[in-house]
Amino acid sequence: MKDFRVTVDYRRNVLRLARASDNHDENSHDATTVPFTLASADPLIVVQAVVNEQGPFQFALDTGEGRTVLTPELAERLNIGATKEVKGAGVGGEVQLTRATVNSLSLSGATVRNHDVVLGAFLHAISAAAGTELEGVVGNNFLNQFLLTIDYAQNRLTLAVPRQL
């Protein structure tokens, strides 16, 4: 994937791969550019996120994670109250999660309001594996609000407001 710009169009269920050398920018309408780094120990995309207008906090990007995840410590620091205990499935089996809602989650100005999240202590294990301290994971329920392009060559994401069908 490092040789491509990867665009995920969640609304149309389309994945596009374009050569990194192709200068065509399909996301020029209402788009936000988000710089990222790759975690040193794992090819994990790391971005700076703002939660409830506070931060930035270091989050991983996971297109396969259903909901955005916060560490319980970050939720406590930001006074984000839990709404419901739930069980989730992870690579290592069943995990205990707590649902909550944040007023806003932003990546470089691309914002989703009243955003459902889960709180999960399992992020400590992901941080250890990735070799970097993470306070959350940006999940699919944030990303699917946008036309997402991951440009590995430029170390940037583009989050564009999708055109109406």
Image (spheres, grey):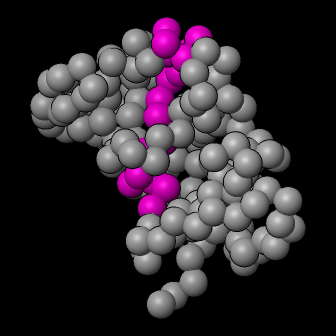
Asked if residue 161 is positioned above or below residue 69 in the image, the reply reads: below
Residue at screen point 60% across, 72% down: 161
Asked if residue 44 is positioned above or below residue 147 in the image, the reply reads: above
Residue at screen point 57% across, 84% down: 163
Q: Is residue 34 visible?
A: no
In the image, residue 36 lies at what x, y percent? 71, 38
Q: Is residue 37 left or right of residue 73?
A: right
Front residue of 25 and 103: 25
Residue at screen point 50% across, 23% down: 135
Q: Is residue 103 left or right of residue 146?
A: left
In the image, residue 104 lies at what x, y percent? 49, 49
Quadrant of res 75: top left
Front residue of 48 and 140: 140
Quick check: is 26 in the magenta stretch? no
Q: In this picture, which residue range is highlighted in magenta? A: 127-145
Asked if residue 78 is positioned above or below residue 30 in the image, the reply reads: above
Residue at screen point 44% across, 18% down: 126
In the image, residue 153 lies at what x, y percent? 80, 45
Q: Is residue 66 left or right of residue 127?
A: left
In the image, residue 52 lies at what x, y percent? 52, 41
Front residue of 58 and 56: 58
Q: Is residue 140 visible?
A: yes
Residue found at the far bottom of this picture: 165
Front residue of 159 and 81: 159
Callout count: 0
